[in-house]
């Protein structure tokens, strides 16, 4: 299912929460943000609406690796043929950059960038002793390397996300954040269950996809 559809469902959940709980503008914005992000977060295990903006950056970094290595190699070749000045370590580095540019996929670089964001969240959480933020950072940093519609699309991931939401709720003292976070995440799994590929809700205990036909 498209990311825009998941986001729309998440926003609807956030709007419903804004009406259900005592209304303030700040709380409404918070419910909408948490529900919308939660509805998208399960797809951090692949190209998604959340990580799509990193695609051009990943491509640029890959090109920089490749052409930076080529330029470096040209400079070293000039030094060797003009001055007979050979630098084994620098030459090895140039070749390594060229090879990385050839073999590194844009998806790998994108995953690495997402993991850097996760590591930053873990550091901030550790600095300010925010356990929920460290858990959130661990989730963000880890899931890009998982198979798509694998562990992130399970009841175990839903429980983990609820734990993160519970920590956030205790931190900011706003009722309903846990419920909104879990509802947003669950909406993603339920929506994907309606697709032809379905969802492996109990993976790895039960590895077959569960599908619902309407």
Image (cartoon, rainbow, N blue to C red):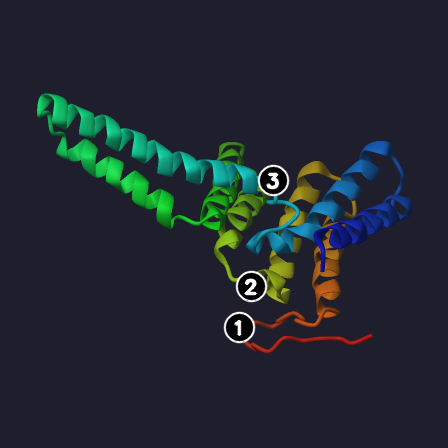
Q: Nearer the viewer, mark 3 or mark 2?
A: 3
Secondary structure under tag 1 reads loop
**Residue at 52% from the left image edge and 62% from the top image edge:** 147
N-terminal of the two: label 1 or label 3?
3
Q: Position of residue 105 (x, y in %)?
A: 44, 49
Mark 2 neighbour density, 10 Å: few (under 14) some (14–19) many (20 or more) = many
**Residue at 62% from the left image edge and 66% from the top image edge:** 154
Q: Nearer the viewer, mark 1 or mark 3?
A: 3
Q: Position of residue 96 (x, y in %)?
A: 27, 41
Residue named by callout 3: 53
Q: For this view, does 49 lie left or right of residue 76?
A: right
Q: Position of residue 43 (x, y in %)?
A: 62, 55
Q: Is residue 150 above or below residue 22?
A: below
Nearest the eye: 86 or 82: 82
Q: Quadrant of the C terminus?
A: bottom right
How far apart marks 1 and 2 lie (CA) works out to: 8 Å
Mark 1 neighbour density, 10 Å: few (under 14) some (14–19) many (20 or more) = few
Residue named by callout 2: 151
Q: For this view, does 25 lie left or right of residue 159?
A: right
**Residue at 36% from the left image edge and 34% from the top image edge:** 67
N-terminal of the two: label 1 or label 2?
2
Mark 3 in CB contact with mark 2 (< 8 angstroms)? no
Q: Is residue 90 above or below residue 154?
A: above
How far apart marks 1 and 3 lie (CA) works out to: 31 Å
Q: Find residue 180 and name its label.
A: none
**Residue at 62% from the left image edge and 49% from the top image edge:** 164
Residue named by callout 1: 204
Mark 1 in CB contact with mark 2 (< 8 angstroms)? yes
């Amino acid at each position: 299912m498209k990311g825009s559809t998941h986001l729309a469902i998440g926003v609807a959940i956030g709007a419903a929460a804004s009406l259900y709980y005592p209304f303030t503008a700040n709380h409404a914005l918070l419910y909408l943000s948490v529900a919308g992000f939660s509805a998208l977060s399960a797809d951090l295990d692949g190209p998604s609406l959340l990580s799509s903006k990193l695609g051009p950056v990943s491509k640029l970094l890959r090109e920089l690796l490749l052409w930076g290595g080529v330029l470096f190699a040209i400079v070293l070749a000039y030094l060797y043929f003009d001055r007979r000045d050979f630098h084994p370590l620098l030459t090895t580095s140039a070749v390594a950059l060229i090879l990385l540019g050839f073999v590194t996929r844009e998806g790998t670089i994108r995953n690495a960038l997402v993991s850097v964001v996760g590591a930053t969240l873990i550091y901030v959480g550790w600095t300010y002793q925010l356990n929920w933020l460290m858990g959130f950072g661990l989730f963000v940093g880890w899931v890009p390397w998982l198979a798509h519609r694998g562990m992130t699309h399970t009841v175990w991931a839903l429980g983990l996300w609820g734990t993160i939401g519970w920590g956030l709720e205790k931190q900011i003292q706003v009722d309903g954040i846990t419920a909104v976070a879990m509802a947003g995440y669950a909406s993603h799994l339920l929506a994907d269950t309606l697709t032809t590929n379905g969802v492996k809700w109990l993976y790895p205990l039960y590895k077959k996809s569960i599908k619902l036909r309407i």
